Image: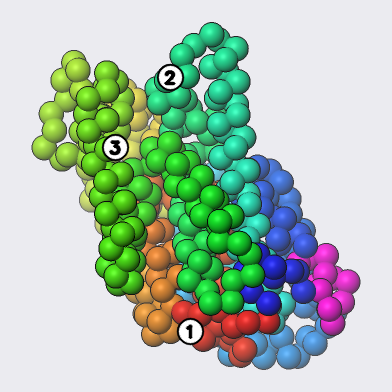
Amino acid sequence: MSGANNIIHLNNQDWLDKISLIALILSVFFLPLNMWLNNLLTLLFIGLQLISFVKTDFKEKQKRLKQNRNLLFIFTLPFTLTVIGTIYSDNLSNAYDDIVRLAPILMLPMLFVLNPDMIRINRNAIGWVLVIGCLLSALLCWANNFYTIYNNNESFMRILKPEYANQGLTKVLDLHASYIAILVNTSLAFIVYHLDSSKLKIKRLWLYIGFGILVLFLFHLLARTAIVTFLLAALVYIIARKKWKILIVLLTGLTVLTVTVQSIDQNYLRDRLINSLNFFQKESQFSKKDDRFNRLKASYEVFLQHPIIGPGTADDDDFRRPIFKRNRDVIAYNQNYNAHNQFFEYLSTYGIVGAIVFIVLFYTIFAKVIRHKNYFYLFIFSAFLLASMTESLLERTLGIVYFGLALSFLIILTTKNGLKSQHYENN
């Protein structure tokens, strides 16, 4: 069964697997909504699957781990690197916190390998709950903003002001806008896959409506990297499928958006969507420039001080802050900014070793995806890699859990009865 009619398959599973599967599905649902509930349900899934590992088919599951040990070793390198970095870290308390936060990257790939059939036959259900979670996230954010605007007797046109867009939009969820945008892009890709399915058993109108809502939400989040990723992917898809009418609609929409942003009496939109993406743009009293790329120099200086293995887990901030202070970067210093770039985060924390881990990890990921010609996962990991150029994604719990889940689904590609092509198998 495919599409939205794909139900949760619980037959022929013991009670541990049934409860753990429900916990996993609910954890994905809450990923764009509430990290506390997501963490609780993820922990429940991990705990129950560990009990199941010991309780049922112990030798068979050991065999599966052994068969996938090389890929598991590479996919869990972020966790391993964090543990090793703790050995020579001077900030043990925060280092231990980092180890705990990165546990999903260690546990989820292994647990998916141990029970691939349960995951494989329920992957559509897991995908749909993420879509529903993102839609509910959009509705909650908009409802909160419109209620606030109404309560304050403000014009509804203020919905595009900074207090109601980007971080202001997601403050009701206490989640970072850029991270929610990654989940939205994932949901959009999932919907597109099912729109292309010849066995779709849900009215396409509902998918078009859901797709439209999520696109509006993505642009309102003003997460620039995610928007650029979406537009590039859309362009590639349209050209590859020769959907010229959609191309005209896309170009028309972009033209209208550009003209509106340039003409509207709001510096914020121009700064956010246009000026800050121009590396040659100079800051003035009328226009603000995004300094995140200039701030990479601070992380690079930390790397030069400890080029081989870095200062260790959770120690890079202690070296970066004095550089922010010297450069009179008040915002970065007061808010203790990280590198806002995952590669430079690893480079400044773990030196050349960290850089090698980053390169090996993503080389392996893309080699695996390209080998299996899985275009859905190609988009997912391309979007994550692009986002990691402007965010230190593995420094936040949402980014860690998302990446752990993505790696876990990818590893199913290599297991028996796993996903073998760009098309999901029908159940």
User: Does the rendering let one see residue 90?
Assistant: no
Q: Secondary structure at mark 2?
A: helix
- Residue 405 falls in which quadrant of the image? bottom right
At which x and y percent is residue 172? 59, 30
The picture places residue 33, in percent across and down from the top left corner, at: 63, 43
- Position above or below: 277 against 288: below
Residue at the (45%, 24%) spot, across then down:
159
Q: Residue 11 lies in magenta, yes or no?
A: yes
The residue depicted at 49 percent of the width and 11 percent of the height is 154
What residue is rendered at 27% in x and 18% in y?
A: 265
Q: Disc number at residue 421?
A: 1
Identify which amino acid the numbered label 3 is placed on: Leu
Q: Which residue is mark 2?
A: 158
- Does residue 339 belong to the magenta stretch? no
The kind of secondary structure element at disc 1 is: loop
**Which residue is the site of mark 3?**
257
Going from the N terminus, do you reach mark 3 or mark 2 first? Answer: 2
Kind of residue sitting beneath label 1? Ser
Looking at the rendered structure, the kind of residue marked 2 is Arg
Q: Magenta stretch: give its range.
A: 10-21
Q: Contact (CB < 8 A) between labels 2 and 1? A: no
The reply to whether the C-beta atoms of the residues labelled 3 and 1 are less than 8 Å apart is: no
Image quarter hosting the C terminus = bottom right
Q: Nearer the viewer, residue 349 or 203?
A: 203
Q: Residue at x 40, y 65 (%)?
A: 379
**Element carrying mark 3:** helix
Q: CA distance from mark 3 to mark 2?
A: 17 Å
Using a 10 Å C-alpha cutoff, classify the residue at mark 3 as few (fewer than 14 neighbours), some (14 to 19) or many (20 or more): few
